[in-house]
C-alpha cells in the first residue's frame, strides 16, 4: 500500500501564530524590536560611516522682477526673451563695428551658395569709383551707404563675380530684389 504524504496545513499554522500573538502581544512586540535592533547593528558594521557632505551654497535665482516660482512659465518666457535680446544686441553691435568683415562674410556666403567666383573688397571700391559714388538707378550719392547688387540675380543663375555686380542705394536694391535687370529697368521707366 502506498503511503500518502500528509500535507502540512498552512492555515492551521497561521491560526496557531495568530493565537500566539493574541495571547502574548508584549512578547511578540519585544521580539520584533530585538530583531530590528540586531539587523541595524549588522548593517552598521557593513556600511561605511556616513560622512556629512558639504553642500555648495545655492545661488539666488535671478528673478527679473517677476515673482518666482509663483508663475514659472511667465518667468521662463521673460528670461528667454532677455537672453535673446541681449544676444541679438551683441551681434548687431559686432556687425556695426565690423562692416568690412560683414561684407566679406556675405560675399563668402554668396560664393558658397553659387559655387562661383568671388569678388574682393577692392573690386567693390573700383566699381564705386566707376559709378562716381552714385546709385545706378536713382543717381543718389551712396558713398557711405551702398549695397552690392547682382545685375543678374543669383537666383536667376547670375554669376557671383565683379562683372555681375553694381552698387545700389538700399531702397533701389530692395525694390529690384531678384527681378530680371531689364524687367526692373522697364518697371521704373528707364527702358521703354
Ligand atoms: Zn537708388
Image (tube, rainbow, N blue to C red):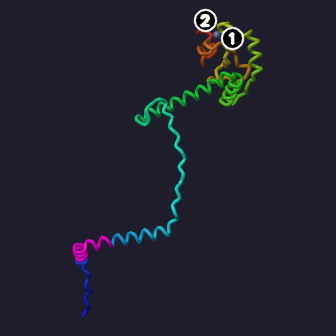
Q: Which residue is mark 2?
A: 189
Q: State the mark number for residue 100.
A: none
Q: Is residue 21 magenta?
A: yes
Q: Is residue 163 magenta?
A: no
Q: Quadrant of ligand 1?
A: top right
Looking at the image, residue 85 lies above or below residue 8: above
What residue is rendered at 27% in x and 86% in y? 5
Q: Total number of numbered labels?
A: 2
Q: Residues within 10 Å of mark 1 (few under 14, many from 20)?
A: some
Q: Position of residue 149 (x, y in %)?
A: 66, 18
Magenta residues span: 15-30
Instruction: Quarter of the image for the N terminus: give it.
Output: bottom left
Q: Position of residue 42 (x, y in %)?
A: 45, 71
Q: Position of residue 87 (x, y in %)?
A: 58, 29
Q: Residues within 10 Å of mark 2 (few under 14, many from 20)?
A: few
Q: Residue 159's image quarter?
A: top right
Q: Position of residue 35 (x, y in %)?
A: 37, 72
Work out whether mark 1 precedes mark 2 in sequence or the reverse, and give the earlier one.
1
Q: Residue 96's image quarter?
A: top right
The answer to whether the residue bearing label 1 lies less than 8 angstroms from the nearest atom of ligand 1 is yes
Q: Which residue is mark 1?
A: 142
Is 99 or 139 nearer to us in this picture? 99
Task: Calculate the distance from the C-alpha at mark 1 to the C-alpha at mark 2.
Answer: 21 Å
Q: Is residue 2 left or right of residue 75?
A: left
Looking at the image, residue 149 lies above or below residue 139: below
Q: Is residue 55 left or right of residue 101?
A: left
Amino acid at each position: 500500500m502506498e503511503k500518502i504524504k500528509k500535507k502540512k496545513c498552512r492555515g492551521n499554522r497561521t491560526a496557531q501564530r495568530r493565537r500566539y500573538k493574541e495571547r502574548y502581544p508584549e512578547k511578540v512586540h519585544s521580539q520584533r524590536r530585538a530583531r530590528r535592533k540586531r539587523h541595524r547593528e549588522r548593517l552598521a558594521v557593513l556600511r561605511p560611516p556616513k560622512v556629512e557632505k558639504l553642500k555648495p551654497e545655492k545661488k539666488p535665482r535671478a528673478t527679473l522682477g517677476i515673482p518666482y516660482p509663483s508663475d514659472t512659465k511667465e518667468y521662463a518666457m521673460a528670461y528667454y526673451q532677455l537672453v535673446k535680446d541681449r544676444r541679438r544686441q551683441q551681434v548687431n553691435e559686432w556687425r556695426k563695428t565690423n562692416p568690412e568683415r560683414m561684407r566679406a562674410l556675405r560675399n563668402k556666403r554668396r560664393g558658397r551658395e553659387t559655387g562661383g567666383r568671388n569678388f574682393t573688397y577692392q573690386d567693390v571700391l573700383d566699381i564705386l569709383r566707376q559709378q562716381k559714388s552714385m546709385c545706378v538707378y536713382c543717381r543718389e550719392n551712396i558713398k557711405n551707404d551702398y549695397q552690392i547688387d547682382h545685375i543678374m540675380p543669383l537666383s536667376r543663375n547670375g554669376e557671383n563675380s565683379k562683372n555681375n555686380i553694381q552698387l545700389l542705394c538700399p531702397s533701389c536694391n530692395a525694390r529690384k530684389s531678384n527681378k530680371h535687370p531689364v524687367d526692373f529697368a522697364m518697371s521704373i521707366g528707364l527702358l521703354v
